[in-house]
Amino acid sequence: MRALALAALLIGLPVTAFAGGGFDIVVPGRPGVPIIINNIDASYTVIEGTWGLGKNVQVQPTIYGGRYVAERQPADVGHYYPTLGLRPGYGRLEVEPSANRKLPKPAESYHQSWGAQSAPLPAQMDVPVDPPPVILAPEINEQPRRPRPRPRAEMPGRRPG
């Protein structure tokens, strides 16, 4: 009995190893949102060879069915590239008004200006209204400082004591 169970196990193991090499049917998770693989809309198609998508091995899957989707604008939202030949998918609707329409009244005039200047100098009380061409500044030290006499020990040629 044990030998029969072991034989069934050994026969069944290789079969399960080959189970991952079949095909897959792609069903989108949300309606209206396509599944795009290599610029091909693979929604509701049969795909073979997707085992590399789940591992670190890059294998190009074979897609049976599907339709080619031309490259559109990059996924960056808010950018428009005119070289692609496509109109932007957002923006305002430009409507040219007729020439004989009633014009609005003109806006009132508005003017604003800015300026910069140095801070005003402090008031000087000593300067006369009409000063002479040369003003003599008073001397601060009227009596020059006399040098202090050195102590006897520091005089040159003398010995202390």
Image: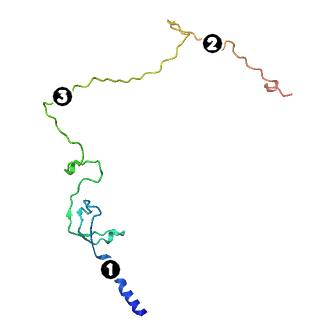
Closer to us: 117 or 75: 75
Residue bearing the label numbered 3: 103
Q: Using the numbered discs, state the Cα–Cα distance from disc 1 to disc 3 in whole angstroms.
A: 78 Å
Distance from the alpha carbon under mark 1 to that under mark 2: 111 Å
Q: Nearer the viewer, mark 3 or mark 2?
A: 3
Residue at (39, 86) in percent of width and height: 9
Q: Position of residue 34 (x, y in %)?
A: 25, 61
Does 156 sit left or right of 29 as displayed? right
Dot 2: what SS?
loop
Q: Is residue 138 above or below residue 46?
A: above
Q: Nearer the viewer, residue 92 or 112?
A: 92
Dot 3: what SS? Answer: loop
Under mark 3, the amino acid is Leu
Circle 1/circle 3 CB separation < 8 Å: no
Residue extending furthest toward the left? 100
Q: Which residue is labeled 2 in the image?
A: 139
Dot 3, how many residues are within 10 Å of its Cα: few (below 14), some (14-19), or many (20+)? few
- Residue ID at (15%, 31%): 101
Q: Nearer the viewer, residue 153 or 106?
A: 106
State the image coordinates of residue 65 (x, y, percent, origin top left). Answer: 20, 68
Q: Which residue, given by chain and number where applicable, does mark 1 sit on?
A: 18
Residue 120 versus residue 39 in the image, above or below: above
Mark 1 and mark 2 lie on one chain; the one further toward the N terminus is 1
Counting residues from the start of the chain, the first of labels 3 and 2 encountered is 3
> Residue 122 versus residue 86: which sits nearer the camera?
86
Q: Callout 2: 10 Å neighbours few (<14), some, many (20+)? A: few
Crowd tier of the residue under label 1, counting other residues whose Cα lies within 10 Å: few below 14, some 14–19, many 20 or above: few
Which dot marks residue 99? Answer: none
Residue 44 lies in what quarter of the image? bottom left
The N terminus, quarter of image? bottom left
